[in-house]
Image (spheres, rainbow, N blue to C red):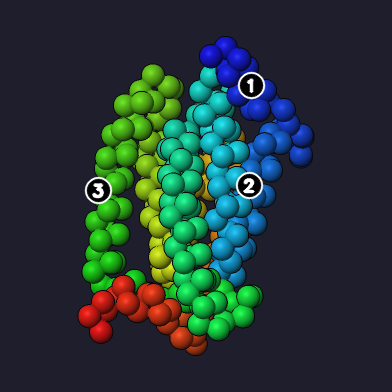
C-alpha cells in the first residue's frame, strides 16, 4: 500500500511548468490521448475507443492520487469515477462500432468507411436519458458528498462533480449508440466542467476541455450532416424496427 501511495504521489508531482503553473506530465499525456480519441470519434473511427481507454487510465491516476497527498489539489472523486465508467462504456462502444463496421465491410464498403451512420435518438430514448441524467445527478451528489465529507470542499463542488459524472456517462453511451445528442451532452458537461477543473487547479485538463468545446461544436455539425446524407446502418435499422 505504501508503494502504491508513493507511485501515485510521484505521478501527481512529476510535472513541467507552463506560464508559472506546474502541469503533471501524466495529466498532459492523458488529455492528449483523450483529444486524439475525440478527433477519431468525430471521424467515426473504431480506434477512437482503445485510444480513449488509455487516456482514461492515465487521468484516473491523476484524480485519485490527490487523495493520498494532503498538500495536493482537491481530489475530484466524480472525475475519477467517470474514468472507470468511460472504460466500461468504451469497451461496449468498441464492440458496437466494430460490429457495425464489419457489417459494412461485408456489404462491400471500402476499408476507410466510417464505422457508423449517426442519427438522432428516438423520442423514447430521449425521455430515457433525461430521466437518467436527473436521477443520476441526485444519487451521485449524495454519494460523492458522503465519500468526500471529510474533505474541505464546499457542497456545490459535489453537485458540479455529479453533473459532470452523470453527463459524461450518458455522453459516452450516446457516442457508442451513434446519437447526434452525444455532442450536445458534452457541451452541457463542459459548461460546468471547465470552471470546476480550473478552480480545482487541474489546469491542463481545464484548458483541453475548453479546446474540446470548439471541437464539439464542429463535430456536432459533422455528425448532423452525415445523419442527413448517409444511408442508415443496416444493423441500426433492424434494432429500431426488428419486425420490419
| Identity of the residue drawn at 38% across and 55% down | 170
| Identity of the residue drawn at 28% across and 66% down | 125
Q: How many marks?
A: 3
Q: Earlier in the sequence, mark 3 or mark 1?
A: 1
Q: Residues within 10 Å of mark 1 (few under 14, many from 20)?
A: few
Which label sits on residue 135?
Answer: 3
Q: Is residue 205 above or below residue 123?
A: above
Give coordinates of residue 83: x percent, y percent: 49, 42
Give the distance between the C-alpha atoms of the residues marked 2 and 3, in whole angstroms: 29 Å
Q: Quadrant of residue 65?
A: top right
Q: Is residue 118 above or below residue 197?
A: below
Q: Is residue 49 above or below residue 179?
A: above
Q: Which residue is mark 2?
A: 31
Closer to viewer: mark 3 or mark 1: 1
Closer to viewer: mark 2 or mark 1: 1
Q: Residues within 10 Å of mark 3 (few under 14, many from 20)?
A: few
Q: Quadrant of residue 118?
A: bottom left
Q: Which residue is mark 1?
A: 7
Give the distance between the C-alpha atoms of the residues marked 2 and 1, in whole angstroms: 20 Å
Which label sits on residue 234?
Answer: none
Q: Is residue 7 above or below residue 39?
A: above
Amino acid at each position: 500500500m505504501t508503494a502504491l501511495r508513493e507511485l501515485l504521489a510521484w505521478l501527481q508531482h512529476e510535472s513541467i511548468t507552463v506560464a508559472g503553473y506546474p502541469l503533471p506530465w501524466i495529466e498532459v499525456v492523458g488529455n492528449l490521448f483523450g483529444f486524439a480519441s475525440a478527433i477519431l470519434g468525430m471521424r467515426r473511427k473504431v480506434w477512437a475507443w482503445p485510444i480513449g481507454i488509455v487516456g482514461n487510465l492515465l487521468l484516473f491516476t491523476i484524480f485519485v492520487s490527490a487523495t493520498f497527498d494532503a498538500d495536493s489539489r482537491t481530489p475530484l472523486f466524480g472525475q475519477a469515477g467517470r474514468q472507470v465508467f468511460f472504460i466500461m462504456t468504451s469497451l461496449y462502444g468498441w464492440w458496437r462500432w466494430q460490429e457495425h463496421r464489419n457489417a459494412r465491410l461485408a456489404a462491400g464498403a471500402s476499408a476507410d468507411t466510417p464505422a457508423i451512420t449517426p442519427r438522432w435518438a428516438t423520442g423514447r430514448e430521449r425521455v430515457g436519458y433525461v430521466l437518467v441524467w436527473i436521477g443520476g445527478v441526485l444519487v451521485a451528489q449524495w454519494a460523492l458528498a458522503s465519500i468526500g465529507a471529510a474533505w474541505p470542499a464546499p457542497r456545490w463542488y459535489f453537485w458540479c462533480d455529479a453533473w459532470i459524472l452523470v453527463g459524461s456517462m450518458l455522453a459516452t453511451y450516446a457516442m457508442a449508440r451513434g446519437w447526434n445528442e452525444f455532442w450536445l451532452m458534452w457541451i452541457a458537461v463542459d459548461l460546468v466542467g471547465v470552471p470546476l477543473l480550473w478552480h480545482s487547479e487541474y489546469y491542463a485538463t481545464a484548458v483541453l476541455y475548453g479546446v474540446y468545446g470548439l471541437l464539439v461544436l464542429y463535430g456536432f455539425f459533422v455528425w448532423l450532416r452525415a445523419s442527413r446524407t448517409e444511408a442508415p446502418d443496416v444493423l441500426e435499422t433492424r434494432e429500431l424496427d426488428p419486425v420490419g
